[in-house]
């Protein structure tokens, strides 16, 4: 049952942990489109400037786990004509959308963050937004990010705090738990371990490590955008959810539960709630 519920998450690395690779890479384009059109503006776009804070003109930048390119596009605006930006992701459909909406100057690769197809000391900056928690071998991922950075290169990495720290995600977690009658911690929020994150970076060789908790707001025009954005932004999630909930109305049940739980966060502008992140900056 937990493996089925895992498909409720809209995140590439999380999907890889629960489905076979050929199934994963065959995700329908419309799922990636919904992910980009609904989830990216609300959940990922608000962090773009912070994640790209240390990017300067002339930098060569790698966006590791780029998805549909929200950080990658911000980076290309900052590096100028003398810099370069490269995005990597496991999901080719995500990369296709990223490429179609981005500058032709950006290079895109389908690749695993634990096996980067780049030379040592190639990049001035590496960004990594909401990826590490989904990687089975986290140390290998940090080792690879360290390897491809040049001496004195900069890493910025973000990992969500647990769902308990965010009203919207806690409401979703609690609603799902109520439906299946057992606790269901959401895996995308499973790596709220600042000490462990710092230890991984230290072991990889990073120095001047600064780890902080930063909170920004997530906004949807309505609660149903949040619920259906997750449904449409994930592979085959509708069928899995209706199977668990008993029928197709299960999605509506979750939406109704969330509207009750989030009533104090809903106004005439829509649904708005805090989303805290563990944000790490470090130097090679």
Image (spheres, rainbow, N blue to C red):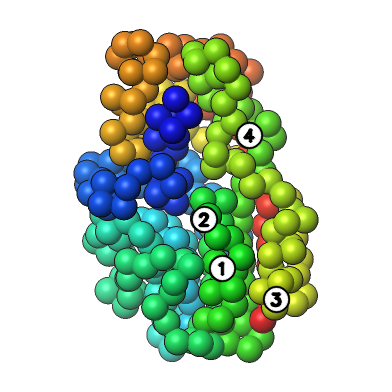
Q: Earlier in the sequence, mark 4 or mark 1?
A: 1
Q: Secondary structure beneath disc 4?
A: helix
Q: Secondary structure beneath disc 3?
A: loop
Res 126 visible? yes
Q: Earlier in the sequence, mark 3 or mark 4?
A: 4
Q: Which residue is mark 3?
A: 206
Q: Residue at x 43, y 74 (%)?
A: 116
**Residue 126 x, y percent position in the rendering:** 54, 73
Q: Earlier in the sequence, mark 1 or mark 3?
A: 1
Residue at mark 2 to residue at mark 1: CA–CA distance: 9 Å
Specify the label residue 140 is tagged with: 1
Labels 2 & 1 near each other (Cβ < 8 A): yes
**Residue 65 x, y percent position in the rendering:** 45, 61
Q: Which residue is mark 4?
A: 163
State left or right for residue 91 relative to residue 141: left
Q: Residue at x 64, y 47 (%)?
A: 191
Q: Which residue is mark 2?
A: 135
Residue at mark 4 to residue at mark 1: CA–CA distance: 26 Å
Q: Is residue 204 above or below residue 74?
A: below
Q: Residue at x 34, y 74 (%)?
A: 106
């Amino acid at each position: 049952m937990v493996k089925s519920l895992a498909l409720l998450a809209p995140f590439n690395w999380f999907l890889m942990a629960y489905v076979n690779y050929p199934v994963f890479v065959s995700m329908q384009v419309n799922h990636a489109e919904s992910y980009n059109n609904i989830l990216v503006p609300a959940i990922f776009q608000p962090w773009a400037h912070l994640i790209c804070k240390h990017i300067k003109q002339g930098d060569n930048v790698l966006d590791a786990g780029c998805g549909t390119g929200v950080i990658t596009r911000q980076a290309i605006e900052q590096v100028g004509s003398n810099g370069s930006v490269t995005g990597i992701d496991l999901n080719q459909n995500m990369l296709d959308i990223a490429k179609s909406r981005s500058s032709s100057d950006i290079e895109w690769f389908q690749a695993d963050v634990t096996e980067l197809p780049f030379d040592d000391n190639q990049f001035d900056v590496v960004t990594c937004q909401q990826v590490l928690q989904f990687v089975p071998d986290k140390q290998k991922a940090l080792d690879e990010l360290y390897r491809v950075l040049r001496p004195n290169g900069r890493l910025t990495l973000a990992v969500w705090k647990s769902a308990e720290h965010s009203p919207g995600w806690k409401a979703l977690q609690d609603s799902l738990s109520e439906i299946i009658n057992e606790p269901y911690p959401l895996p995308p929020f499973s790596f709220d371990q600042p000490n462990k994150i710092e230890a991984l970076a230290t072991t990889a060789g990073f120095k001047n490590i600064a780890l902080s908790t930063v909170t920004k707001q997530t906004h949807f025009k309505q609660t149903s955008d949040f619920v259906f954005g997750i449904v449409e932004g994930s592979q085959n999630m509708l069928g899995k959810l209706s199977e668990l909930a008993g029928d197709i109305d299960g999605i509506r049940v979750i939406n109704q539960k969330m509207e009750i739980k989030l009533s104090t966060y809903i106004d005439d502008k829509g649904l708005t709630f805090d989303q805290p992140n563990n944000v790490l900056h470090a130097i090679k």
